[in-house]
Image (cartoon, grey):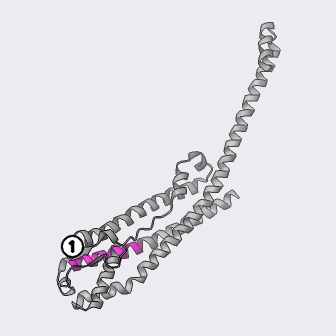
């Protein structure tokens, strides 16, 4: 309708009507664009609210994973101390041998919790949503993203070294790789009296134990970083409310 009136006005050279029709068309386009922009921003605001909620849920999950892993490491402290004692005394008793086998199994286990970061990755890929956040919180997101990526890499690296040092490289240890969950999957291949006199084994055993303590230290430190990010998240949610 407007198009026909516009064309007719041009043919009649009725420039007042032409101008009015042009203004109406232009205003309609501007209003439509503004409405579409408002609608997009509104959808992004809703999506951001959901993402912030999911970020908090991921922090809760990671906190539980880290606590579980710290408990697991702590629960094996006494066993490791007994294994160190067995190496010092060169005792071939079945109890010491069983303890050493259990510690070897534990040391080569998986102490690298798969920390949740799905929502964090999604948020980092959506610039229109990131722009709705405060500059301070965007900085906190960058710091936390780098921290969690570094943590995952370092924990996996430490786990690889533990496995490599005591299963792949040492002839005094045998492993049934087809059934790792079996308590006897990783065992000494020689008596304790032989192992304790092997300086290379002793050195590797202590280094592997240190890697486990390093994992505990790293997880504890990362938990503190998570706490700082949680505080920043809470402040951002409050700012938006």
Q: Quadrant of the N terminus?
A: top right
Which stretch is magenta?
201-217
- Residue found at the very far top of the displayed protein: 12
Which of the 4 image quadrants contains residue 82? bottom left
Q: Nearer the viewer, residue 131 or 54?
A: 54
The residue drawn where x is 71% and y is 58% is 241
Horizontal arrangement in the rendering, residue 61 relative to residue 79 (left or right): right
Horizontal arrangement in the rendering, residue 65 relative to residue 241 (left or right): left
Q: Nearer the viewer, residue 165 or 12?
A: 165
The residue that mark 1 highlights is 170
Q: Nearer the viewer, residue 191 or 77?
A: 191
Q: Position of residue 115 (x, y in %)?
A: 48, 64
The residue drawn where x is 51% and y is 67% is 62
Residue 118 higher or lower than 199, as above or below: above
Near mark 1 (Cα within 10 A), the count class, few <14, some 14-19 or many ≥20, is some
The residue drawn where x is 77% and y is 23% is 23
At numbered mark 1, what does the secondary structure look like: helix, strand or loop?
A: loop
């Amino acid at each position: 309708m407007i198009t026909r009136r516009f064309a007719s006005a041009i043919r009649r050279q009725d420039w007042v009507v032409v101008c009015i029709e042009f203004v109406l068309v232009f205003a309609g386009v501007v209003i439509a664009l503004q409405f579409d922009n408002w609608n997009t921003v509104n959808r992004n605001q809703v999506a951001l609210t959901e993402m912030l909620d999911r970020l908090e849920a991921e922090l809760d999950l990671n906190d539980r994973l880290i606590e579980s892993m710290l408990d697991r490491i702590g629960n094996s402290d006494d066993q490791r101390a007994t294994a160190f004692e067995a190496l010092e005394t060169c005792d071939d008793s079945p109890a010491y041998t069983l303890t050493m086998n259990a510690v070897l199994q534990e040391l080569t286990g998986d102490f690298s919790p798969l920390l949740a970061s799905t929502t964090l990755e999604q948020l980092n890929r959506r610039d229109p949503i990131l722009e709705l956040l405060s500059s301070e919180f965007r900085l906190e997101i960058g710091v936390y993203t780098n921290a969690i990526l570094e943590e995952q890499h370092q924990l996996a690296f430490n786990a690889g070294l533990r496995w490599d040092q005591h299963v792949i490289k040492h002839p005094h240890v045998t492993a049934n790789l087809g059934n790792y969950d079996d308590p006897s999957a990783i065992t000494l291949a020689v008596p304790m009296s032989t192992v304790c006199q092997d300086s290379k084994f002793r050195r590797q055993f202590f280094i592997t134990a240190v890697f486990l303590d390093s994992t505990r230290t790293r997880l504890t430190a990362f938990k503190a970083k998570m706490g700082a990010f949680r505080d920043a998240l809470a402040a951002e949610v409050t700012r938006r409310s």
